Amino acid sequence: MADTLEKGSEYNSGSSDNGSQIHAAIYERPTGLKGFYYHPVTQVVMLGFVCFMGPGLFNALNGLGAGGQVDATTSANANVAVYATFAAGAFFAGTVNNKLGSRLTLLLGTTGYSLYIGAFLAMNIHPHAGPFVIASGAILGLCAGLLWTAQGSLMLSYATESQKGVFIGIFWGIFNLGAVVGASVSLAENIKNKANSVGNGTYIGFLVLTLIGVTIPMFMADPHKMIRTDGTKVTSPRHPSWKVEIVGLWVTLIKDPLIILLFPMFFASNWFYTWQFNDFNAALFNARTRSLDDLVYYLSQIFGSIAIGLLLDRKTLSRRTRAFSGWSILFAMVFGVHIWAYFYQKHYTRASPNLGTIDFTDSAYGGRVVLYALFGILDAMWQTTSYWLMGAMSNDPAKLAFLTGFYKSLQSAGAAVIWRVDALKNPFMNIFISTWTLLAVGLLLALPMIYIRVKDHTDLVEETMWRMDDSGHIRDVDVVAAETKTTS
């Protein structure tokens, strides 16, 4: 579909894929060193390193299991706080971004990650600092909402329509390397440590990197001074207020009720981390082996995302064929890896002796690390397919924004629930079965939605949010189609 221009706004998203272009003033881009600094790619790379140093290292810390500690209770409760405040605070982050601007919002968002990792360092020195860790988790959840809102504004506003895929790829590539580098730092620090908790050096290394991340937004360019590669000026889109956000979610649900069938899949998308990180990695392996597992896990994610992405973007197959193929691969992966994991899980409980003692030099390690790599691949495939299915349901940016809002809210709510279940020391097997069951149910309920809603071409009649005017009235298809032609 052709680009649409918001009434009363100078915002323009650049050239569209079908060659249509909204008429806008063209400016000459700076040259030389200034041109390099103000180049959109340079700024997106800087943005990627902000998230490399923040969320990327948070993922690496969580991947160690128990946040690198012996007792997973405090880490689990901290994650409850993170995801609970993230789920609630994300609704208000857009309003904050509108008031402060994306760069300052990004700066505020990064500070929570330094505080959180610093809290774990404090607990490593003072074992009774658990409440501080949990409180820092609550603050981090609010900061994470700010960071990801600002990140989305900057990344998408810098790209022309034809560059969005490339810019997203650059950002996510750099961001995901954060977890890989974080795991490498932890492995290097703990390679001679056969104890069950990581040393202070790991937390200090993570803390230094996150503090560097806090400084990067200070050196990023003012978005209002940026000019895209097509000569159009960057105007960051305004986020809807929290009231409009909630109303929009409700309208999306009413107008497209089949989205409910994806809710269990969304809910499960962070649920499995608890068993993988705390009840498998932290429960079975010593500190240096957990660091190695963490590295393997995130390297495997790169392979998983590329593999499923190549399938889902394969243009020689119809969209429906790709959708069912992706679903089938996820189904096989979920049952394959969990059947394998069951034969390990049934041999240990929270009361088992010698927990946290398996070393990568032991014969028992080989099969378990291969399984952990498969969990990393499954994670990447699950997240990628979830986003792809949302994109296959609609071409309307407004509707996609609300769908991803459902995704992040349900994802965070599910994570808060299961981390609390783990903190209450429920049996490992119960958490494992809940993980397997929720993944399977999520896939089974998504199947009829795929059959009904994923088509080879998206029709305008299904784009309810696209056809909604400023007063909330749903306009006729013919009216919107005529308007679309006049802007092409």
Image: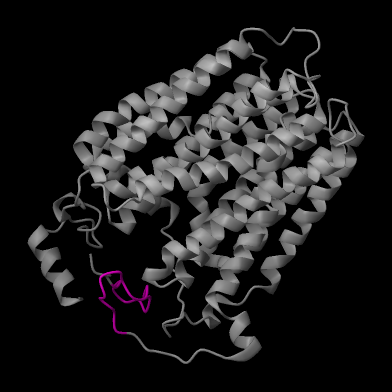
Residue at image coords 80%, 42%: 186
Give 88 or 394, whichever is nearer the viewer.
394
Question: Residue 333 in the image: x percent, y percent?
Answer: 45, 27
Comparing 97 with 35, the one in front is 35
Identify the residue shown where x is 45% and y is 75%: 235
In the rendered structure, the answer to whether residue 24 lies left or right of residue 351 reads: left
The x and y percentages for residue 320 are: 24, 42
Number of dots carrying numbers: 0
Tell me which secondary structure the magenta stretch mostly adopts: loop
Q: Is residue 211 left or right of residue 173?
A: right
In magenta stretch: residue 12 = yes
Horizontally, is 103 left or right of 352 in the view?
A: left
Which range of residues does the magenta coloring cover? 5-23
Q: Which residue is at 90% across, 34% downward?
A: 192
The quadrant holding residue 240 is: bottom left
Q: Is residue 405 visible?
A: no
- Write the residue at 46% across / 25% down: 334
338 or 161: nearer the viewer: 338
Residue 205 shows up from this direction: yes
In the rendering, at what x and y percent does residue 289 appear? 77, 30
In the image, is 317 to the left or to the right of 328?
left
Q: Is residue 326 magenta?
A: no
